[in-house]
Amino acid sequence: MKAAWTTYLDRLGPQGLRVVLERMIEPSELESLVGRRMETGEGPADPALFVVDAVAERPDLGGTLLERLDELADGRGALPEGEGPLRQLIADQLRAPDDASPALLHRLARADEAPLPVAELRTAAELIAAALEADGRPARREFVAKVASDRASLKELEQERRELEARVRKLETQLARAVERTAALEERLARRLNELHAARQSERSEREERTRLAREVERLRRRIEQLNERRAQERTGEVSTALRRLTREHRRAAAALEKLREAERERREVVRENSRQVVRLAGLVEQLVALREAESRQVAAAQQEILRQFGDLRRELVGDGEGERPAARTRRRAGEVQRVGLFVDVQNMFYGARERGARVDFEALLATASEGRQLVRAVAYVVEAKEIDQSAFIHLLQMKAYEVKRKPLRVRADRTAKGNWDLEMALDAMSSADNLDVVVLATGDGDFVPLVRQLKMRGVRVEVYGFRRSTAPDLREAADRFVAIGRKLLRDAGPRKTASR
């Protein structure tokens, strides 16, 4: 859409409008378009003032006049693209104005968008008008061309000045942001250093608590030895009472140790974060973590030894008390409580539960398998991988009266892994068969079918707990009873991966 009359007049100015009207439209035709005669008076009439007055009275004349000028300007060339070529064309017209100059001014003012700033268009129109009125005076034309050139240079310098000021403001903004960022980084560094100092203080407190717990465990171990020495002289009831009291004390100590381990894991996360922020302290933090893990393994080994002694003492207490050999098979009379042993293939249970998006509730499994019967032995067979910390899970099993046996996952040269307890689990079941009436196998592996048959030949009832989809059919058929693990023996899979196996 081309510029309207008001924009057209603003771009050309009075002098530019006068030159366009005088050079492109005859006076008689101009009077015919406007519908009135020019009042000459004593001198020549000004076409610009004549048309402006007429359009002020009748605004529709502006559009008619511009359309006539468009017709007259057609065929006299088009405007070049870009400000540089356009300024060069205007400079050429200033040096040597001709009949095409009014048409050029008309196209500049009539464009839908101003090809140059309005002030520059108006100045160019005034200079071209002055050059056309010079009537062949070269000095005037050279002066007008020089003025136009100087104005163009001045505008370029002004544009360059504005660009430089904008760059200076941008650089000042960047500098201010950099100063703010530096201050923020210094504040974060000071905060990390304070957190590291607090972590060191917590580490010292935890080390003292761990030492106290180790002394408590040693004291309990000595008390167990004393009970073993006095076991032959004391009555079974008194020993059982002392054992239950000692067990409660040990559980309290284990619970305190578990809380310490939870605090230890949280502290490790803080240490790792501090290590990423303060690189120069990473080596020291890694050494502290390695020392702490070694101490934790020593405490776990001491706990395992205590639990093993508990198991030996309990097995001795549930014997017939008349010097019968441990390997002798004791038959149960009708009406007596059955003796049961639970053997759990933890890895098989873990993968079976994972297919259902859950994990096995080992406490519920133990309670269900021994319900209404005398639990003689409960063994959990765990395969440990280096990249997974299962210490909390193993401790949980030990707290639930499981005897935990651990074996590392072995990786062969071809990167295949091996880690199963089939042979050891079968040997433990066979060796315990003489003291059991019922053997409960928590597994779905069909390799245990020969074991089931051997146990049944020795008069032992065999029950299999497993997942219906993942338990071998021949294992279900060989067992005296198959119990499908359902929601009662499962828990929702939690975020903690250390207790997954």
Image (tube, rainbow, N blue to C red):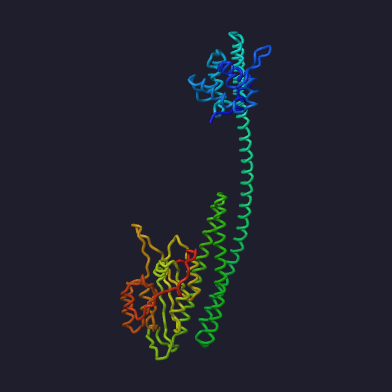
Split into 4 quadrants, where in the image is the C terminus? bottom left
Residue 403 appears in the figure: no
In the image, what residue occupies the spot 63% across and 57% down? Answer: 198
In the image, residue 185 lies at what x, y percent?
61, 46
Query: Vertical placement of 476 versus 146: above or below?
Result: below
Quadrant for residue 209, please give it. Answer: bottom right
| Residue 339 relative to residue 112: left or right | left
| Residue 15 relative to residue 501: left or right | right
Q: Nearer the viewer, residue 144 or 377?
A: 144
| Residue 399 relative to residue 176: left or right | left
Q: Nearer the viewer, residue 164 or 151?
A: 151
In the image, residue 113 lies at what x, y percent?
55, 29
Query: Vertical placement of 424 versus 96: above or below?
Result: below
| Residue 392 relative to residue 464: left or right | right
Quadrant for residue 114, please give it. Answer: top right
In the image, residue 331 lies at what x, y percent?
38, 88
Q: How many marks?
A: 0
Q: Nearer the viewer, residue 16 or 274?
A: 16
Residue 500 appears in the figure: yes
Quadrant for residue 64, please give it. Answer: top right
Query: Vertical placement of 20 versus 316: above or below?
Result: above
Q: Nearer the viewer, residue 82 or 316?
A: 82
In the image, residue 199 lies at what x, y percent?
60, 58
Q: Residue furthest bottom?
A: 334
